[in-house]
Image: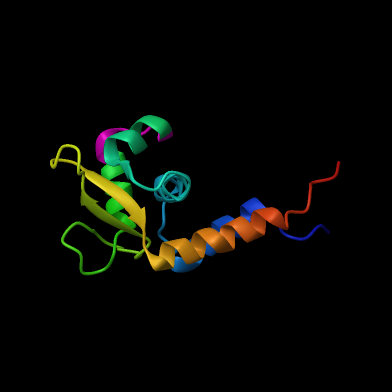
Amino acid sequence: MRPRDSLLEAILALKALDARISVNEIVAFLYTCENEGLSVQELAYVAGLTQSTASRSLRSLGRPGSDWAQSPALGLVDAFLNPTDGRSHVVHLTDQGRALRDRLDELIRRAIPIEL
């Protein structure tokens, strides 16, 4: 039997934060990892999500206690007013988000190819 692959291991690492994490929240986190500073609208566009789904997904990843975050507030991202328009938000990883990103990046680097 082959060891767990990097994709499954990454999903399980995210599920370990909160078993209720959704696919949309995982997608939002991964896009934020690759595009820190993106806006909710930009995330919606690149991820193929509606703007409301993108917003809800990012808010679920927000810092606990933040006015912007919503449950489960996993503490992976912070949102700031967009400096170019002041009406939307841009998203950056928290220290916890960066640590998880680095862990996922290491899982990918150590990946064991699937052999047929």
Camera-side residue: 55 or 78? 78
Task: Write the residue at 69% across / 55% down.
Answer: 109
- Comparing 114 with 109, the one in front is 109
Residue 78 sits in quarter: bottom left
Quadrant containing the C terminus is top right
Q: Quadrant of residue 65?
A: bottom left
Taking the spot 13% from the left edge, 40% from the top edge, the residue there is 87
Q: Residue at x 83, y 59 (%)?
A: 1
In percent of width and height, residue 88 lies at 18, 41
Q: Relative to the observer, which residue lies in front, 71 or 45?
A: 45
- Note whether 69 is above or below 43 in the view shown: below
| Left-right relation of 71 to 13 | left
| Of the pair 1 and 70, the residue shown nearer to us | 70
Can you name the residue that lies furthest to the front here? 84
Q: Is residue 79 left or right of residue 30?
A: left
Residue extent of the magenta highlight? 47-52
Q: Residue 69: percent from the left, percent from the top? A: 23, 59
Residue that appears at 27% across and 46% down: 90
State yes or no: residue 48 in magenta. Answer: yes
Q: Quadrant of residue 94?
A: bottom left
* In magenta segment, residue 9: no
Residue 56: in sight, yes or no? yes
User: How far across and down, in percent of the image, does residue 36 sit?
Assistant: 39, 48
Q: Position of residue 58 (x, y in %)?
A: 31, 50
Query: Is any atom of residue 15 visible in this view?
Result: no
> Is 4 situated above or below 16?
above
